Amino acid sequence: MAHGSGPAAAPSGQPLDHVARIQAEWARERPDLDVSPQGVIGRLHRLAAHLTEELAAVFDDFELSAGEFDVLAALRRAGTPFERSPSELAETTMITSGGLSKRLDRLESAGLVERRILEGDRRQRVVALTATGRSVIDRAIEAHLENEHRLLSVLSAEERAAIEALLARWMRVADDAPPRTAPG
C-alpha cells in the first residue's frame, strides 16, 4: 500500500467513509492509539455540519436564520397569546441576552415580533408574535419538519428510535457533567 493511501473498503466490503479513512491512516501511523472515539464523534461532527446546512436551507426560504427560527418557534410553542419575557426566551432558546437582543431587533424590524409592556405590570416587558410572525412560523415549522422527515428517511423507524434513545441518554449525561476546565 502506498504511503498516504488507506484501505479502499471496510471489512463489510463497503467503501470507507471520510472518518474511516482517517482512522485507517492513524492505525497505520500510530497503531498504539485507540482512535475508536473518532468513529462516533467524527461522524457526529460531520453529520451535524451536513444537517446544519440542510436545515439552514429551509430557514433561508423564509428569510430566517436558525436563531430567528428558534425565537419564533419558542413564541409559537408558548400558546396564546404567543408571548414570553426576554428571560424566558433566552432560557428556552439557550441564546445569550446579547444574541437574543440582536435577533429580536431583526425580527421586530421584519414585523414578525413586537416588544411591549406586560398588561397589569408596567415593569415587565414581553416579546410577542405578530399575526405575520405567527403565519411565518406556522409555515416554516411545517417546511422544517418535512425537511427533517426527508433527512431521516434513509433510516428505518427502528433505527431512528435507537439513535434517538442513545442520543437522549448521552445528552442527559452531558447536561449533568460539570464544564471542562482548560488545562493549565
Image (tube, rainbow, N blue to C red):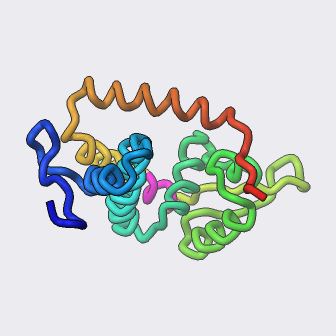
- Which of 184/96 is in front? 184
Which quadrant of the rendered structure holds the C terminus?
bottom right
- Which of 13/161 is in front? 13
**Residue 45, position as x, y percentages in the image:** 42, 53
Drawn side of residue 180 relative to residue 5, left or right:
right
Residue lying farthest left?
13
**Residue 124, position as x, y percentages in the image:** 85, 53
Residue drawn at (8%, 41%) of the image:
13
Residue drawn at (58%, 56%) of the image:
71
- Which of 45/25 is in front? 25
Drawn side of residue 146 relative to residue 55, left or right:
left
Q: Quadrant of residue 157?
A: top left
Residue drawn at (67%, 63%) of the image:
100
Q: How many marks?
A: 0
Residue 146 shows in the view: yes
Q: Main secondary structure of the magenta part?
A: helix
Drawn side of residue 74 relative to residue 183, left or right:
left
**Residue 23, position as x, y percentages in the image:** 33, 51
Note whether 134 is above or below 107 in the view shown: above
Which quadrant of the rendered structure holds the N terminus?
bottom left
Residue 143 shows in the view: no
Q: Is residue 183 magenta?
A: no
Drawn side of residue 4 relative to residue 176, left or right:
left
Residue drawn at (55%, 65%) of the image:
112
What stretch of residues is rendered in magenta?
A: 133-137
